Image (spheres, helix red, strand yellow):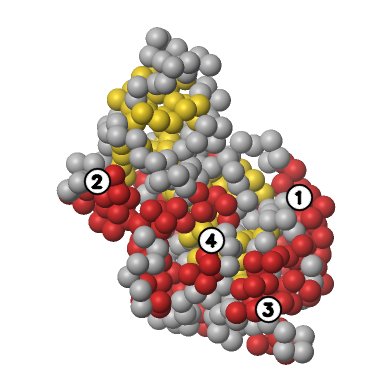
Amino acid sequence: MSGGTRLVADAVLPCDGSGAVHRPGAVDIGPDGRIARVGPVAAPAGSTDDSGEWTVKWVGGLLMPGLVNAHCHSPMTLLRGQGEGLPLDRWLREVIWPREARVGGDDVFWGMSLAAAELLRYGVTTTVEMYFHDDRLAEAVDAAGSRCVITPAVVVAPGWERFGTWPERIEWIAGLRSRYSAHPRIEVGFGPHSAYALPDEAIAAVGEAARSLGAPVHIHVAESEHEGDEVSARHGGATVPQVLSDLGLFDVDRVLAAHAVWLTAKDVDLLASDGVAVAHCPGSNAKLASGTAGLTALLRAGIPVGLGTDGPASNNDLDLWEEMRLAALLARQRERDPTVLPAAEVLGLATVGGAAALGRSDIGALQPGRWADIVRLDLDDPGFVPVLSDGDLAAHAVWSASRAAVRDVWVAGRQVVADGECTTVDVAEARRRVQAAAEALAR
């Protein structure tokens, strides 16, 4: 292969599950935007060397995979911080849903554009989005150069009538998936909001559509303690996960359950046996006092788990580094065990673990064949001092350096953040547009 780029750094952390650290190391990016080789700077015999086939760039610092935000509603930058201090149900019904009923396509484009700049600047290269006006959301993602699994929401709630009936919404989503079927950075799936926001027949229909198209499904499950009470009452006391399974939704190959806080032990076994993944959102759950998911129980059951920020209206930022720390802190507090979730494992939840939760083997790690979604951290950041062993790099990345150390980001080999600034979004214009839209929605 020729015409590629070799990034050479002080250290490379592949996050591929092997525990490998290359100091110094290099990542070779082919002209197709995929990784050709990861390893020490000195290439082994028989592989591509520095004979002129590669453009060699010394970048220094630490290279690692781009982060995967497994659950988000990023255009809610439009509603950041609104409805502070309310519990989830009142927050949705009194503040969020009434304002969202007036959100237009241009609002979503600019809300997602601003969010994309924030996400990329924090090293998040892939997000899983559930929202509406998803054609405009996709346009914003495409323009920003980020990667996204877009799961347009299917909801029966006040204000959602403007998007048609739920059967019409399912049909529209199928059409959007077809439109983006060949896009290298955008995948479209289905986003049934929750069991409590849809009739049973709608959930069953989403499952059928997703199975027929091979599309992923992304749904809120057991986020708050009593949200599923009415659903359970209609089904003879069955828990929401059991209801979703009985309706056939979990028969889809790729199902991502967001939150999964209030699960019984039987629910955990059910998710494991049905192959359902979980997006763990410790920050949003704590802020809304929704509870703390049993992360270690999920992992022990073999359930794929990624980390999510949730939307910027409930978190209120898109900082996945903060979610890493919270995930570990809350798990240790819950288990009363300071040894659970060591730093390398936590970093894995935000990278290769997040990719696995999405059912994706093409992102989340620095491995040959995967997309060259790469983050460079500045090892001159005070949070990286001292480094006495390879293990310190992951520990400092999780516990001390975090988003402040992110300096450069590439998606599919294209640089989208340079020296801490997003180069693909007009941030000043996006900020102006979102401010104006938020003021209008609040009236």
- Viewer-nearest of discs 2 and 1: 2
Q: Which mark is residue 214?
A: 1
Q: Residues within 10 Å of mark 1 (few under 14, many from 20)?
A: few
Q: What distance separates the C-alpha of mark 2 from that of mark 1?
A: 44 Å
- Please name the residue that numbered disc 2 is placed on: 389
**Given contact means CB atoms under 8 Å apart, are the residues at marks 1 and 3 in contact?**
no
Element on which disc 4 rests: strand
In the figure, 247 relative to 11: above or below? below
- Residue 305 circle label: 4
Residue at 38%, 53% in the rendered image: 344
Disc 3 to disc 2, C-alpha distance: 46 Å
Lower sequence index among marks 2 and 1: 1
> In the rendered image, is residue 419 in sight?
no
Q: Which one is in front in this view, the residue at disc 3 or the one at disc 4?
A: 4
Q: Earlier in the sequence, mark 1 or mark 3?
A: 1
Distance (Cα) linking label 3 and label 4: 19 Å
Amino acid type, mark 1: Gly
Q: Nearer the viewer, mark 4 or mark 1?
A: 4
| Residue 270 drawn at (x, y percent) | 68, 72
* Residue 11 picture quarter: top left
